[in-house]
Image (tube, rainbow, N blue to C red):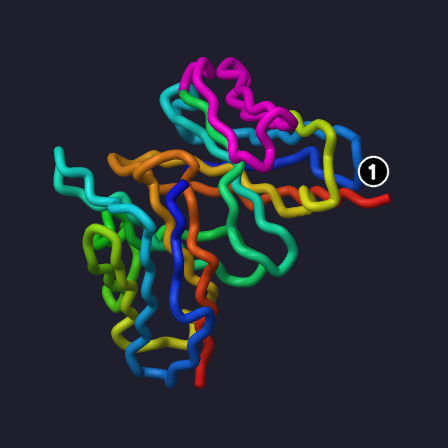
Amino acid sequence: EVQLVESGGGLVQPGGSLRLSCAASGLTFRNYYFHWVRQAPGKGLVWVSRVNGDGSSTAYADSVKGRFTISRDNAKNTLYVQMNSLRVEDTALYFCATSTGAHDAFDIWGQGTVVTVSS
Amino acid sequence: DIVMTQSPDSLAVSLGERATINCKSSQTLLYSSNNKNYLAWYQQKPGQPPKLLIYWASTRESGVPGRFSGSGSGTDFTLTISSLQAEDVAVYYCQQYYTTPRTFGQGTKLEIK
C-alpha cells in the first residue's frame, strides 16, 4: 500500500522558518514527481510546489516563490519543503501528493501537517 | 495561470436525486496531440485529504462508484452524481493538470436537502 506521511508542522512566528517532511512508502520513490498542496482553515486547495524525480526541476506558486524551497532525498524516500520568511497567510494544512497513474492527477495524498504562523 | 471556476459554490440535493457541479477553465485543457482533457475531480470529506474521483475529465479512478461521472471538453466540464447517497456529502474540487501551477477550483459544497 502506498503511504505518504507528513511531519514538521507547528506554531511559528511571522518571519520564522519551518521544514516539512513527507515520508513515502510502498512505491519506487525516485520514479515520481511530488507536490505540496495547502489548505487554509475553512478554505480551498492551493497548489504550492512540485519537484521532479531526481530533484533537478522545481516549480512554485507565485505566493511562495523565493521563500519556499522544495527538495527530496531519494535515498530516504522523503520529500521536503523548507519554508522561510513565513507569513500569517501561510497558515494552513499542508499536504504532500503524487500521481502514480498514467495520468498526472494526484491519486495519492498524505493526511497533512498543520502550520500556524502567529505572533 | 489557468483560472478554474466552479459553480455553484454550494448545492443541496435530495437523497437519490442527481447532483451536477460545473467547472470552467480560463484556457483549454484539451491537449491536441493526444485528444485528452487534463482535468481531474476530487472529493474531500471533513478531516480527510482529497480523494481522486475522475481524471482525463471522464475516467473514473479505480474503486469510485459508478454513480460518479465526468464530462466535458476544452474549457467546460461537469461532475455528475446520478443518485445522491448520504456518504457523498463533501466538498468537490476540479483541478487542471495541463500546466503548472496546477490550479484548483474554489470548491463546491454538496449537502443533503
Please name whichever residue, B33 or A116, is drawn nearer the observer in this view of the structure: B33
Please name whichever residue, A11 or A68, is drawn nearer the observer in this view of the structure: A68
Which image quarter is the C terminus of chain A in? top right
Q: Which residue is drawn at 70% across and 38% down?
A: A9
Whole-percent x, y for residue A108 in the image: 42, 41
Q: Does the magenta stretch include residue A73?
A: yes
Whole-percent x, y for residue A114 in the image: 68, 45
Residue receiving disc 1:
A13
Q: Which amino acid does label 1 sit on?
A: Gln
Extreme residue toward the right, this view: A119
Q: Is residue A94 above or below residue B113?
A: above
Whole-percent x, y for residue A100 in the image: 34, 34
Sort mark 1 into few (<14), some (14-19) or many (20+) by Cα contacts within 10 Å: some
**Which segment did they paint magenta?**
A53-81
Quarter of the image holding residue A21? Answer: top right
Q: Which chain carries label 1?
A: A
Q: Is residue B22 magenta?
A: no
Q: In this view, does A64 lie to the left or right of B9?
A: right
Helix, strand or loop under label 1: loop
Which image quarter is the N terminus of chain A in? top left
Q: In this view, does B105 lie above or below A13?
A: below
Please name whichever residue, A88 or A52, is drawn nearer the observer in this view of the structure: A88
